[in-house]
Image (cartoon, rainbow, N blue to C red):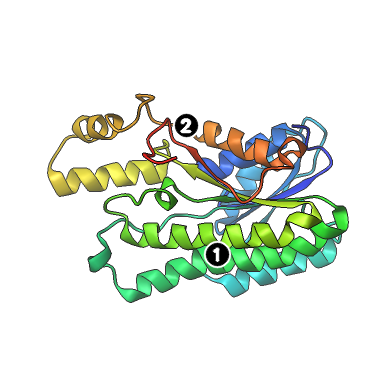
Amino acid sequence: MQLSSYHALVGGSTQGIGRAVAEALATQGATVTLLARHEARLREAAATLPTPGGQAHDFLVADFTDPAQVAAVVGEYLAAHPAGFQILVNNTGGPAAGPLLAAPGAAFEVAFRQHVVCSQLLAQAVVPGMVAAGYGRIINIISTSVKAPLPGLGVSNTIRGAVASWAKTLANEVAAQAITVNNVLPGATVTQRHTSLIEKKMAETGQSQAEVEATMLRQIPAGRFGQAHEVAAAVAFLASPAAGYITGTSLPVDGGRTGSL
């Protein structure tokens, strides 16, 4: 699990699962570059990351709704840091909730750029450095919906599935170059998005928070919601040398909720 030789690029890393992932990788010794759109939050997050090996963490400012900006910012950074990144964690905010037929076409276009196109451009940017290093880990934070679509998340279900297919295809293309590509699928995890989905359900049904949460918990064999650090632990393992023979997989971290193998 020791990552002191590696440099990680972590998207959406100022809060929630992304920040927990950055903290987990840093704790294992990785140098971490945070990537998100809010500079003040990035600065604060980078300053609080663990430094057990004296790492110098940093950050990049870019908005995932603008793939060209993401590619340009990362490309400029790589030009100044030719050693590149050995770990890429693709993570950004999920599409808004709502039924499929109510979603405008533009919602799919925005989500596709934000999740699929940005992941593609980032992979194109970092894979050459991974090949040169003889080590690469690409990990995508998506959703259990790639195994079983979730009610009321029409756009998200569609786009998450596209990311999973993209990842499986890429995994097969780069496996012989010591690069793995895997997906981590969080279930109901306590984050800001989790809270917003509960609030939306409360508004739709008139139920209390306790009633909405009780309904959700009945679907989880573990009987509780997940924590961001538990998802991050799975990412840290997949980023490590110990996971070198695991690629092209989608790993649910969901307390047993997903009803498929």
Viewer can see residue 236? yes
Q: Residue furthest front?
A: 261
Between 101 and 42, the one nearer to me in the picture:
101
Residue 63, disc: 1
Q: Quadrant of residue 54?
A: top right
Q: Is residue 101 left or right of residue 109?
A: left
Q: Quadrant of residue 229?
A: top right
The residue type indicated by label 1 comes to: Asp
Where residue 175 appears, as percent x and y from the top left, is 73, 55
2 or 1: mark nearer the eye: 2
| Vertical order, 43 against 66 (above or below) | above
How many labels sit on residues?
2
User: What residue appears at the point 57 percent right and 42 percent down from the top-left corner?
Assistant: 19
Which residue is disc 2 drawn over?
227
Q: Quadrant of residue 259?
A: top left
Give the mark nearer the N terminus: 2 vs 1: 1
